Amino acid sequence: MERNLKNVLLLSLGFLLLFTAYGGLQSLQSSLYSEEGLGVAALSTLYGGMLLSSMFLPPVLIGKLGCKWTLVLAMCCYVAFSLGNFYASWYTLIPTSILVGLGAAALWSAQGTYLTIVGNMQARKTGQVGKDVVNQYFGIFFLIFQSSGVWGNLISSLVFGQTPTQGTVPEEQLQTCGASDCLMAAASTNSTRRPSQDLIYTLMGIYTGCGFLAVLLTAVFLEPVKDAGPEGDSEKWATPFWSTLLSTFKLLRDKRLRLLILLPMLSGFEQAFLSGDYTRSYATCALGIQFVGYVMICFGAVDALCSVLFGRLARHTGRIALFVLGAVTQLACIVALLLWKPHPSQLPVFFVFPGLWGMADAVWQTQNNALFGVLFEKNKEAAFANYRLWEALGFVIAFGYSTFLCVSVKLYVLLGVLGAAMAAYGAVEYLESRKAVGPLAAARTKPAEEGVAQTKL
């Protein structure tokens, strides 16, 4: 197997194992630890830590340790979060959430940098266009990575389904499900009661084992890489500490990045809504906690399949068409969720929305990452650190207001962010098209001017 592709597959498998555990845990936080809002507080703290670390940590760690060992160190933080869930309390979940937040920014920045480097290496080796290979590698990665949503949630549903807690859901509770949910009643009903502690221990043991396997696989088998890009890119590892520290903010001088920050924020908002609000206010409220995993499997499966499909389609359709597809799909879902009254008799509908949501998310994950990698190729580490910083801010805001706002209000907020992000993205594409047309027009004008000069002679 080709060396660069082998490294992409190894990285993808490591993330698959790691996020089989973390993805399953994230989907359950708001339903499993609903008392006093512990679950969403842990998630908000987690992304708050990611927000802070995104400002300075990724460029420093990648510069000092390289992509591979940054990945290994960050993965260990995720394993700590699984361990903290064995005895979930404010004293275990909040500190481990902060730890994951610190590691997450470095993990994703290293991942984006690693894939961009090996993609460009492969392009130079085979004579292909760099952005096409990078797009393809991101598509392969997200195909494998997004399937973690299938396995992590399947494990949780199979474990919790051993002793179903589902009974007849009272009509009064169904009236407060969906967009009408303004902080679901704290009283435990058949559909919201927690599983037994033994089942929780079993699930956490499986998840922790997956995390340890991910760390071992990455540490032992993934090859370290160095950027051999043009214009002395390799010299940036020797830049002064404070210059590296502030590189994340320095990149904000670029007008394109200032416009694009709404795209990662949208990614944070929409993922937070699905994992925090859809799972609790739609699935758990009307069906029961044992259905959360099955519902999220649908999201993960469609997301994975569409990720590899869009990675390949991008070279034929261009990224603009895919961004329009993602925006229209998410817009349709938001409007429908505002109007829908969830009921157990409508079981298939509970799976349709996560499927469509996964299709839109596949656009954001593959195309956003590829867009940042292509537009800011000379500052990849800082660009991906910015991406994770603003995505984390979206998560923090969404989880932060999760216990204060009605679901309908959250959907309207998401609608506003979607509209603003698409308008800003359109502005960036316009700027890029003008930049591309400029040199072309100059090249056409030059021969014409030469012809005029020859005529005069």
Image (cartoon, rainbow, N blue to C red):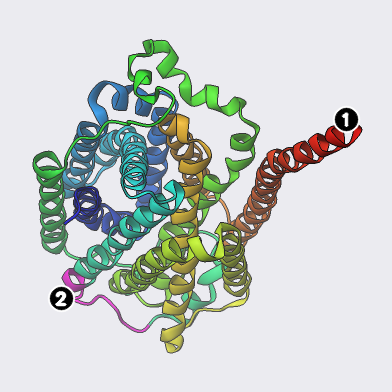
Image-based side of 214 in relation to 167, left or right: left
Task: Name the residue type under label 1.
Answer: Leu
Name the residue located 17 percent from the left edge and 59 percent from the top edge.
200
For the C terminus, the quadrant is top right
* Structural crowding at the residue carrying mark 1, measured as other residues with C-alpha within 10 Å and reported as few (<14), some (14–19) or many (≥20): few
Please give the label number shown on residue 457: 1
Name the residue located 42 percent from the left edge and 61 percent from the top edge.
311
Q: Is residue 164 magenta?
A: yes
Q: Which residue is farthest right?
A: 456
Please give the label number shown on residue 162: 2
Q: Which type of secondary structure does the marked residue at label 2 adopt?
A: loop
Q: Quadrant of residue 341?
A: bottom right
**Which span is picked out in magenta?**
158-168
Q: Quadrant of residue 453?
A: top right
Task: Name the residue type under label 2.
Answer: Gln
Image-based side of 186 in relation to 14, left or right: right
Q: Which type of secondary structure does the marked residue at label 1 adopt?
A: loop
Query: Closer to the camera: disc 2 or disc 1?
Result: 1
Instruction: Report x, y in % for residue 319.
Output: 55, 58
Instruction: Report x, y in % for residue 373.
Output: 45, 42
* Structural crowding at the residue carrying mark 2, measured as other residues with C-alpha within 10 Å and reported as few (<14), some (14–19) or many (≥20): few
